[in-house]
Amino acid sequence: MRSQTIEWRSSFSRCARSSYEVLDMSRPGEPGRMAFRFEARNAKCLYEVVALEQVDGTDWTADGYPSLEAYRKKDAPGWRDSPLPTRLVLECPMTQLR
């Protein structure tokens, strides 16, 4: 992530550098939380929205959502556990290495 662009690279999805929209950001003093929507996606980018949430000091969870709708409805009953491809969410634990 940079001040004007964001990119995501993983084994399964490669989202080229794009401008982004901030959908969510934690306030000072709260655990880290942020969500971004790619404003432009290439064919290899599986996720329109990437959300990061701090679990503790060095551990984070990264979630990739295939659409803005999937991100917005993530807490709706039956949505997240649905087998429909339009609702599949990547959940990836991450640890900051020092």
Image (spheres, grey):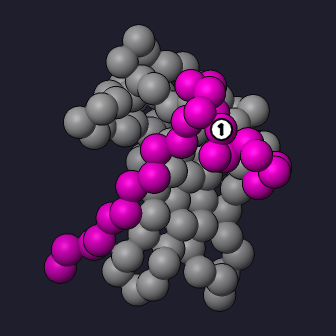
- Please identify the residue farthest to the right as the structure is shown: 76
Q: Regarding mark 1 in the picture, which secondary structure is present there? A: loop
For the stretch drawn in magenta, the main secondary structure is loop
Residue 69 vertical position relative to residue 54 in the rendered view, above or below: above
Q: On the image, numbered disc 1 is attached to which residue?
A: 82
Magenta residue span: 75-98
- Quarter of the image for residue 67 reads top right
| Residue at left offset 20%, top offset 74% | 97
| Residue at left offset 62%, top offset 27% | 84
Residue 81, percent across and down? 63, 46
Residue 76 vertical position relative to residue 37 in the rendered view, above or below: below
| Nearest to the observer: residue 90 or residue 79 | 79
| Residue at left offset 47%, top offset 37% | 5
Q: Is residue 63 visible?
A: yes
Mark 1 closeness class: few <14, some 14–19, many ≥20 residues within 10 Å: few
**Residue type, numbered disc 1:** Ser
Q: Is residue 94 magenta?
A: yes
Q: Is residue 20 visible?
A: no
